[in-house]
Image (spheres, grey):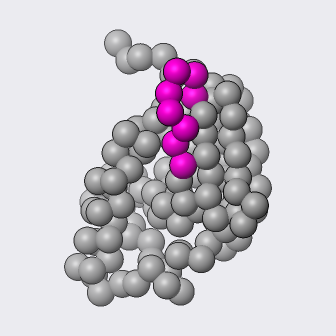
């Protein structure tokens, strides 16, 4: 049985709109850059409908967070300034990404390199 994930006590977008910090009960705050969130969006556009369909999203180094909307009791929808807003970021997904942040980022950079893509627009 999966562990119950709580609501964050705080969700904060930085003044420059380039990062998001979440504070969950009894955990250290976890911060994500807007670029990290955009390229790891849980949307079907990015993740596909299977592992083989996952897209490598390039050119998002300067992306910003425009808006965050709650979705029920379990997630938020993040709207980015490149008009992407279809991913629902659940509390569980934030926890998973936070626990794997370094490995996910290294894998993303390796994918860009392998495919000859760049972080810059």
Residue name at image x 52 percent, y 21 percent: 26
Q: Is residue 104 above or below residue 22?
A: below
Q: Nearer the viewer, residue 1 or 112?
A: 112
Give the total number of marks visible in the rendering: 0
Q: Which of the pair 9/55 is nearer the observer?
A: 9
Q: Residue furthest front?
A: 28
Can residue 43 be seen in the rendering of this structure?
no
Q: Is residue 10 left or right of residue 30?
A: right
Res 2 → quadrant: top left
Identify the residue shown where x is 53% and y is 66%: 35
Q: Is residue 70 magenta?
A: no
Quadrant containing the N terminus is top left
Along the horizontal axis of the image, is 70 left or right of 33? right
Residue 87 visible here: yes
Residue 22 at x, y percent in the picture:
60, 40
What is the magenta segment's predominant secondary structure?
loop
């Amino acid at each position: 049985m999966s562990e119950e994930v709580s609501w964050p006590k705080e969700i904060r977008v930085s003044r420059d709109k380039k990062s998001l910090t979440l504070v969950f009960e009894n955990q250290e705050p976890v911060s994500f850059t807007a670029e990290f969130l955009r390229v790891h969006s849980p949307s079907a556009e990015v993740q596909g409908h299977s592992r083989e369909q996952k897209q490598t999203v390039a050119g998002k180094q300067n992306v910003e967070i425009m808006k965050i909307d709650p979705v029920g009791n379990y997630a938020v929808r993040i709207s980015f300034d490149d008009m992407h807003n279809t991913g629902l970021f659940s509390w569980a997904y934030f926890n998973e990404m936070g626990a794997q942040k370094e490995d996910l980022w290294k894998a993303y950079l390796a994918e860009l390199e392998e495919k000859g893509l760049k972080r810059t627009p």
